Image: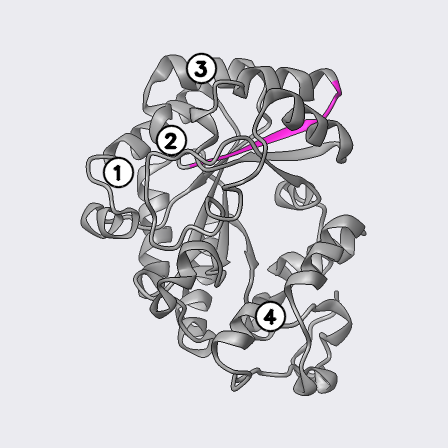
Amino acid sequence: MAIKKSQIGEEISSSLVPVTNKCNQNCLHCSTREIFRNLDFSLKSTLKRVHQIGNLITLTGGEPTLSPNLFKIIDFAKRERKKVELFTNGTTLSYLALAQKLFLSKVDLFNIGLSAYDENLYNKITRTRGLFKAKVKGIKNLEKLGANIKLTYPIHTLNYKHLSKFIDWVKKNFQTVKSVQFNFLCFEGEALKNSWLVPKYEKVEPYLISAFKKCSKYKIDFIVDHIPPCFLGDFFEHHIDLRKLKMNAVFELKHSLKEKKKIEVCSGCQLNSLCCGPRKDYLKLWKNKIVLKPIYVAKLRKT
């Protein structure tokens, strides 16, 4: 079965452009705010970064909607004929006026980070209170406007057992969300202080595959990153690195190769040429004593 250039596939060759390190949440697993702490967020420097990269950009933070320059940045990107993805926690989009202004500014994709479907767990993960309902309202506001929406679910110790129920919840609560990205937790930023948040691949695998089956049932497109494709069962084609290869997204592949590393057992896997290996920070955390699951010819479907 060939991997088509789907809606998600078009997004993966984008490049991150942080626009602020301010945020209205304090997530246990945040991997960006600390990294971007000393970055120059002046309008001039940000527009320079936008100009220098390709025709697909992802505006991120911190929480990008807290940047006073956000609309100037979007306007500049659109004048340069770039597609714009806004990676946001979605809470400020509970204000319909802001959601509408962003929609009318021609943001191509609203990527909403969502780490739990249960309010109490959400409060624990984000170390904030009162924002879960705002996030749900923000997503519903975007749906009313007809916006293109993707949800990104960061997978960690506190939520991986909820993966399948999360997809059920998405199906029940949102009518137009047809795209989900599952991101295994990166061991960087705040996660360095909370290493207990990083589960082992083999523990997450059955819950992931169950969620994939739900996605297929509900016709929700999905993509996966930061966990090797050998843990995705028959759904390995949904791994982001395989899609990058199919699209020849050279810049993003170089980034993946910086983050990931193949180990000895990878040489016997039939996905070896399509995979960048486990993340280097994961290998470091588990002192290279990890389990991988090489896939052999008998298990592969034609691509």
Distance of mark 1 from mark 3, alpha carbons? 20 Å
In the picture, measured across the screen, residue 5 lies left or right of residue 64, that is right
What amino acid is found at the position of numbered circle 3 in the picture?
Gln
Q: Pointer 2: what residue?
A: 139
Query: What amino acid is at disc 1?
Result: Phe
Q: Are marks 1 and 2 in contact (CB under 8 Å)?
A: no
Q: Quadrant of the N terminus?
A: bottom right
How far across and how far down the image is residue 219, in percent? 50, 48
Q: Mark 4: few, some, or many residues within 10 Å (few <14, many ≥20)?
A: some
Q: Is residue 83 magenta?
A: yes
**Residue where numbered disc 3 is placed:** 100
Highlighted magenta segment, given as a residue range: 80-88
Can you tell which of label 4 and label 2 is closer to the viewer? 4
Q: Earlier in the sequence, mark 3 or mark 4?
A: 3
The dot on residue 280 is 4
Mark sitting earlier along the chain (1/4): 1
